Image: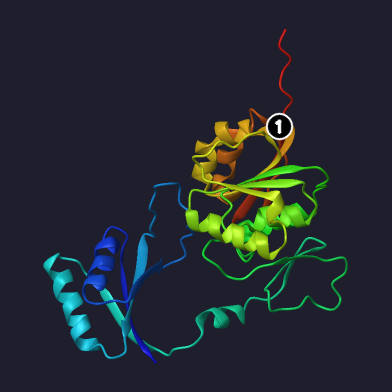
Amino acid sequence: MPWIQIHITAGKHDAPFIETLLEGVGALCVTLTDAGDEPQLEPAPGEEKLWSETIITGLFDATADQNRLRQAVQKTANSQHIQLKIDTEILQDQPWERAWMENFHPMRFGKRLWVVPRDRQLPSDAQDAVSLMLDPGLAFGTGTHATTSLCLQWLDGVDWHAQSVIDYGCGSGILGIAALLLGAESVTGIDHDPQALIASRQNAVANGVMQQLTLLSVAEPVGKPCDILLANILASVLVELAPQLSAIVKPGGSIALSGILHDQAEMVQQAYREEFTLDPPQQLDDWILITGKRLPQPLID
C-alpha cells in the first residue's frame, strides 16, 4: 500500500509547532531531519536539539486528500504568520529495514575488527577477523559515522588483556561490545536513554558477551574506576562532565573521547589536560578523536 508524505521546511523555532500541526491533521508519524548539513549528535540528558533549518515530514494514509492536507496546514501556519515550504510525494510501500540493510555491508576497522550485519558474511580473505554482529536498532551507532569509526579503529589497536572499560553514552553498545570481543575483561555501559540500554543488551546477547557487560543509567553509581573510558558524545557534554569522567579513570588509565568537531578539539583538550597526558588528535572528515592517559596521583606527605 502506498503512502503520502508531506515535507515542510521550517526554522528550528517553528519546527515543534509544525510537528504538532501535522499530528493534528492526521499524520500517522512525524519525523524531523536536517535541511542542510548541520551535524547533531546525541543531546545531553533533558536537552532537545534541532537543526537551524529542519525538514518536518508527516506520513499519511494513501486515502488522504493531498490538497486538503496542504490547505489545512497552510491555513493554520498563516494564522501564526509562519512561512512554509510544503512538498508532497507518494511513497511506495516496502520492507524498509531490509532496504536499509541492503546498503549496510561488512566494514573493517583497523586490522581485524569487523562490524557485520547478521545476515551477511565476512569477505573470504578476512584473516584473523573479530566480528561484531549488528543490525540497525533503536539507538545510534553502527560504525558508519566518522565518530564511531574513529573509536573502532582506535579500539582495534589496544592491548585489552585484563582491562576494565566504561562506555559512557553507550548508544547501541557497539564500542563496549567491540572491546569485549577484542579481549577486554569487563565493560560498563552507561546511557541516559532507556532505549539505548535495551539496544545494548540485545546486541550484547547476540554477540555472546552479555555476562561481561553491566548496563547502568546515568543516575546509578558507577562503582570502581576503569582502565579505559570510552565516550562518543557531544563535545559540550564532554567538557561539562570532564571532572566526573576523569574521576572514573584509574591513574595511568586511558581515555578515548569522540563526537568532537575539528574546531571543538582545543576546547575539549583544555578540559582534560590537567588530569591527562593527551596524544595528538586523530581526524576523520571533520571529526576528531582525543586519546590520552591519566596522570599518576601525586603522593601526599
Q: Quadrant of residue 197?
A: bottom right
Quarter in which the N terminus is drawn: bottom left
Query: Residue type at mark 1?
Result: Lys
| SS at badge 1 | strand
**In the current view of this chain or complex, which residue is farthest to the top?**
301
From the viewer's perspective, is residue 134 above or below residue 232? below
Please give the residue where the numbered disc 1 appears in the rendered image: 250
Query: How far across and down, in percent of the image, does residue 98 sit?
Result: 57, 82
Residue at 83% across, 66% down: 129
Q: Is residue 293 left or right of residue 33?
A: right
Along the line of sight, the residue nearer the viewer: 250 or 195: 195
Q: Is residue 39 at all visible to an observer of this figure? A: yes
Q: Is residue 54 above or below residue 168?
A: below
Identify the image quadrant of the C terminus: top right
Q: Please state which of residues 164 and 113 is positioned toward the viewer in this rendering.
A: 164
Q: Residue furthest left?
A: 79
Determine the residue located farthest toward the front in the rendered image: 211
Residue at 28% from the left image edge and 67% from the top image edge: 19
- Asked if one can make out residue 285 in the rendered structure from this viewpoint, the answer is no
What residue sits 59% from the left and 44% below the top? 265
